[in-house]
Image (cartoon, coloured by chain):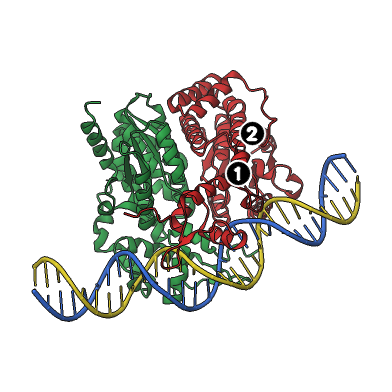
Chain colours: A red, B green, C blue, D yellow
Amino acid sequence: MADFAGLNIAAVERDTGLSKDTLRVWERRYGFPKPLRDSLGERLYSSSEVDKLRCIKRLLDQGYRPGKLMGASDDELARLLESPAGAAAESRDFSPELSAIFDMVKLHRSDELRGLLTQALMKQGLQQFVSAVVVPLNQRIGEGWVRGEIEVMEEHLYTELLQNTLRAAINAYPPQGKRPRVMLTTLSGEEHSLGLLMAEAMLVPEGVQCVSLGIQTPISDIELAARSGNFDVVALSFSAAYSARRAVEGLVSLRSRLPEAIELWAGGAGVRDQQRRLAGTRIIGGIDDTVAALREWRATRIND
Amino acid sequence: MADFAGLNIAAVERDTGLSKDTLRVWERRYGFPKPLRDSLGERLYSSSEVDKLRCIKRLLDQGYRPGKLMGASDDELARLLESPAGAAAESRDFSPELSAIFDMVKLHRSDELRGLLTQALMKQGLQQFVSAVVVPLNQRIGEGWVRGEIEVMEEHLYTELLQNTLRAAINAYPPQGKRPRVMLTTLSGEEHSLGLLMAEAMLVPEGVQCVSLGIQTPISDIELAARSGNFDVVALSFSAAYSARRAVEGLVSLRSRLPEAIELWAGGAGVRDQQRRLAGTRIIGGIDDTVAALREWRATRIND
DNA sequence: CAATCTTTTTTGTCTAGGACAATACAAATG
DNA sequence: CATTTGTATTGTCCTAGACAAAAAAGATTG
């Protein structure tokens, strides 16, 4: 079986995560990749091309731009992958506890990792766990990812186990039925759910009624749900990957559609420093600010 | 603001599992769907078109052919969906317990819903819960979704609370460290994680070491992780929205890259009836088949 | 000098129709 | 009735042009 003629474009899309359109337009613009063609004129990518594409994809994720990378030789790419993009940031005040967790991620020790997470949670309680463990770890993992020290699978593994831990903890609280009623979700295009989970983890111990809708709820559905569900607050989360522009647009649009009485909270790196453009929306400046926002709400509604 | 102009073609691809190329060629050939265009000439699909496309996709999966379906009215499609193919579907033995849960979803009663789910879980145990509660509920919600009885937010709410329940239950099992070691994930393009969670919920009570990587792990990373993680089995999940062709291609490619000794399991509606094309891959025919596959593995490796 | 606003460049995704292989269906044969 | 052969259907790939969204570079301000 002359199996190695090469991969077709669909296979390369799967393997590299680069869309067919992107692969074709790169070929047109930069002359790379330049796959062979089969008898029908369809592209056949060699495995060395695919390897190089994987490198390039990786570097793109680290913030490099296609135009710069496309001319580079294999060696140059390899060198970029090694080199420390942001050498600083290393010597953070990283407690031994956190380091241990981070090491378990790097070693793919899922059982130990789960154990350490649960242990840290038990020791400190949910809110403290989120604020003192989850936040710095996320930060560290994010940095590692950008720098290429963290593999895709390591990031996935961490997210998955952390979700298990947080959801289990949240689920363990009996419903208390105190106000406010808070709906948590993200706008379409935002795929990260950890922010929501962290916010929920801060609120639930305060007796707040949280209803999380998970990610990617269209604005019109948020409006519908907020009105029919008797909510006091709609809380949205925006990761750094979400463009600030889209976030602001979405929030403004949603604010204008929601009744005055329903507060709109927005948190996460995607809306940091946008408070001035968002009158009528409470920007949550950091995870601990969640509780502050809650206190404020309760203070103003004390007479209800 | 006209926020509801419609969905663009990429969003419809995500929602329905029909590729952009397919959507365009249907429009050209059959005149359906015929989306509006924005100021730039780009397609804007109305939500009723997307609903109809979902129906059509579902019927395609049941073996109908596009040419026949494309002319049909909404009513005719609805009738086909009810009738023979999945006849049982409607008048299913839907116990009062399941109906109660379904009703709570429709009423958006999240606290009660959470309570009912936990209660059902406690009563029946994890495996039985998945097989006798989660599966039929998913089915029911899925049908309702296709037919437009279920709102976006209701589906989100259900998924979210179910995830909480399942993850909490999974997390509660102490690691037993028995073989096999199973890695669970999905290929890029598959965004549904419930299937993974259900599989994990079936395996963990058997003492299996499960490591879930969540969704969308590129094939090359799966290979890497499987080799370095000392796994015995790689298990993938494919929802109905995932095209069977892509699933088969991905599985074949992955199979050829993994060492013989690592088994490859694939489950979910996206790979139903594909066993003949997938020598070397164990198709999981239904959630209960997960445990069967496990038994087989243990039977053959009894001497290790 | 830092921070904001504006212009230019880069980059990904969309568009249109044409082409063809792979599959499914129909007809004809043994 | 089972198998082969012919025909219709259907999804994916192709080219090449267009344009918005994002990033970088430049200009302006406090």
| Residue A297: mark | none
Q: Quadrant of residue B224?
A: top left
Which quarter shows the N terminus of chain A? bottom left
Horizontal side of A265 relative to A102 (left or right) equals right
**Residue located at (57% from left, 20% from top):** A97
Identify the residue position indicated by label 2 in the image: A287
**Which is more N-terminal, label 2 or label 1?**
1
Amino acid type assigned to the residue bearing label 1 in the image: Leu
Identify the residue position indicated by label 1 in the image: A77
- Chain letter belonging to callout 1: A
Label 2: element kind:
loop
Is D9 drawn above or below residue B214 in the view shown?
A: below
- Chain letter belonging to callout 2: A
Which quarter shows the C terminus of chain A? top right
Q: Can residue A236 be seen by looking at this rendering?
A: no
Horizontal side of A107 relative to A99 (left or right) equals left
Same chain for the residues at labels 1 and 2, yes or no?
Answer: yes
Label 1: element kind:
helix
Residue A195 position in % (x across, y down): 58, 39
Q: Which of labels 1 and 2 is toward the front?
A: 1
Q: Quadrant of residue A236?
A: top right
